[in-house]
Amino acid sequence: MNNFTFYSPTEFVFGRDTEQQVGALALKYGAQKVMIVYGGGSVVRSGLLDRVKQSLDAAGLPHCELGGIQPNPVDSKVYEGIDLCRREGADMLLPVGGGSVIDTAKAIAAGVPYEGDFWDFFVGKAKVERALKVAVVLTIPAAGSEGSGNAVITRMETLQKLGLCAPFKLRPVFSILNPALTCTLPPAQTAAGIADMMAHIMERYFTNTPQVEISDRLCEGTLKAIIAEAPKVMANPNDYEARANIMWSGMVAHNGTCGVGREEDWSSHALEHEISAIYDVTHGAGLSVIFPAWMTWMVTHNMGKLVQFAVRVWDVPQPSSEASDAELQAVAQEGILRLKQFFRSLDLPTTFAELGIPHPDIDRMTESLRRNKGELLGNYVKLTMEQCKEIYRLAEE
Amino acid sequence: MNNFTFYSPTEFVFGRDTEQQVGALALKYGAQKVMIVYGGGSVVRSGLLDRVKQSLDAAGLPHCELGGIQPNPVDSKVYEGIDLCRREGADMLLPVGGGSVIDTAKAIAAGVPYEGDFWDFFVGKAKVERALKVAVVLTIPAAGSEGSGNAVITRMETLQKLGLCAPFKLRPVFSILNPALTCTLPPAQTAAGIADMMAHIMERYFTNTPQVEISDRLCEGTLKAIIAEAPKVMANPNDYEARANIMWSGMVAHNGTCGVGREEDWSSHALEHEISAIYDVTHGAGLSVIFPAWMTWMVTHNMGKLVQFAVRVWDVPQPSSEASDAELQAVAQEGILRLKQFFRSLDLPTTFAELGIPHPDIDRMTESLRRNKGELLGNYVKLTMEQCKEIYRLAEE
């Protein structure tokens, strides 16, 4: 096990009607003026935005707002938010929504007290030293941004989709998770969220760090819970209990619990970011295409953990200790097949064509990847750009 | 799933040589004067205490110390510590040791700014409103106090062993976990620690709250990791990797991760506290006697979760969906048997006699239990005092 720091200070307030506590919690965490950040009309239509404002009003907290954040959130809204926040003198960002809204709020929180361009943080030119407080009302379980110190933003001018990680500065002070708010999510969004949270676990699971049994088991357990609960939310969107299990799993998947003491991979996320940056597809749907392709490539390059994945997560029978390489490969392939079947059962795509991209421009994506990430990608196997192309091609099949 | 709050703000710094960071971390968390709390001579002999002091010195932090904390820590050391801490003007408690030392430090941290008797917190007469900061250098993985807001202290005058839970006031600001420091633990203490952390999970696992798949899986995964790693640390005390897995599992077992959204039980802990309060045995050894007895009693009173425990944690074959009650009971019994065999493989006792108490005074323990806990105990089945006696008697067999 590698040395590590685990720090997840967020107060998670989970359950029915918990959004009514937002005003009291914002006060408790020292807010004096709150800037609400949200996306499209659903939080307006559902009345959630009004309930949040009422709770802030009841706590005597003034507030301003920034709406219109889109999926695959872009830098222009961050600049707009930084300007607005400075003008209004807000000291707490309150995203009400999913990962795009939360990540935009985090970028604003880091950008407001910074004199330079907030994009410096995303290209590694500057580190986040100070940030406004961020608190969350979550409506989409997927990105895990409610418990992480991460944010992903796309720069429109260059179509660069890049991430920022500032775990000591950008983790929310509190996050409100009411599963009932997720019952109205469309099936496609529910399914994409499930693929995203599974990917967050798998990026951590596939590692060469030996003897990490406790985090292996936490990864496998969280995946098994998601696999058990996902069909229930697809069959009955109003199944509160299944929604609750999925919502909490999405947090566990990305607050660090599953990654302690191990080298993580994250190449599938980087491969996917090129797809969604260029083709503006849903991140989770891109992941359900790329991750099985990445695994298939790994069968012949670094099989070890794939066998464990097949046996422990997908209940493929344990091969004997004398199993041949071909037999082990068959076990690994069976695990990947079951993952693909699972994604398909949620109506998720597992090929570029199913993602709506019949002729992906693999050269362009790989060039962009090289610009954003350099010559080598990931850790489980450090992939050259040629090998990344091979994985993109496997996703065409 | 029940509504819940999950709040685990501690910064965990895990791995080799991490105790060298204690001075810098104490500064980061605003300490001005540190009171070190420790137990017997082992932290002195090993040189750990000196290394901690050197790190504080290097950070320019003055410090004082309170040594001599015993297992099953008692109120007299808390009073002594409160006096010393006030006299010295320390503002951060730094326990260097295991649960007894940490719990004593927490009681001092709550007692110093309180005008009344600190015992008020333990008997429910007062709530902890303010506390000094607590930070930890852990040497014994067992109690999970390094990540919890709990403390257990024994009042000598009345032989009452009671717990305090103040998750928002007494969670450590940081905890340093170096698995290498645990390699010198005697086998009996290692084993008792393992029983203690398993019990922390099982107290949460056995619940009537339905549809808690994610926390079920986190409980089961952590138990499976402990079950895999425990034989390695017993066979080779210097196995750093296995020690690391055990140490982190002990934290996960008790910081709340395993208990979210569910009613917890805690009757086995209360039953055990009477044993260790009266007979001064090791808490973990008392738990390896009581928990299987509690489970055995449950087979005929509330079997449901025992079957899942047997199948998922101990790999007992899944019974068919048409299994009779007798067949299900056999599955549950097999799970309990495997737990007992596991405890025995670690040289832990599973009967009162093996615990060194050939003739336990069950009436006395039950009377004390009634005084401390009232007429009903636990949640999985709310136990009358007569039923508690039945469980104590099962532990004689």
Image (tube, coloured by chain):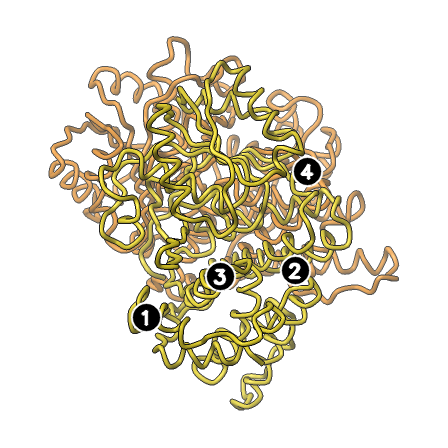
Chain colours: A orange, B yellow
Question: Does dot 2 land on a helix, a strand or a loop?
Answer: helix
Answer left or right for A329 relative to B257.
right
Q: Secondary structure at mark 4?
A: helix
> Going from the N terminus, do you reach mark 1 or mark 4 first?
4
Question: Which callout, 3 or 2, points at the residue further toward the start of the chain?
Answer: 2
Q: Position of residue B370 (x, y in %)?
A: 32, 70
Q: Is residue B244 above or below residue A313?
A: above
Q: Which mark is residue B370?
A: 1
Dot 3 falls on a residue whose secondary structure is helix
Whether the residues at callouts 3 and 2 have beta carbons within 8 Å, the answer is no
Q: Give the crowd class for mark 1: few <14, some 14-19, many >=20 residues within 10 Å.
A: some
- Residue A285 shown left or right of residue B154 in the figure: right
Of marks 1 and 4, the one in the foreground: 1
Q: Could you tell me which chain the residue with mark 4 belongs to?
A: B
Q: How many marks?
A: 4
> Is B257 in front, or is B390?
B390
Secondary structure of residue under mark 1: helix
| Residue denoted by label 4 | B180
Contact between marks 1 and 2 (CB within 8 A): the answer is no
Query: Which mark is first along the chain, 3 or 4?
Result: 4
CB contact under 8 Å: marks 4 and 2: no
Mark 3 to mark 2 CA distance (whole Å)? 25 Å
Question: What amino acid is found at the position of numbered circle 4 in the picture?
Answer: Ala
Q: Chain of mark 3?
A: B
Residue indicated by mark 3: B276
Q: Amino acid at mark 2?
A: Ile
Picture coordinates of residue A223 (x, y %)?
A: 55, 55
Going from N to C along the chain, the mark reached first, 1 or 3, is 3
Q: Quick one: label 4 or label 2, which is nearer the N terminus?
A: 4
Identify the residue under disc 2: B227
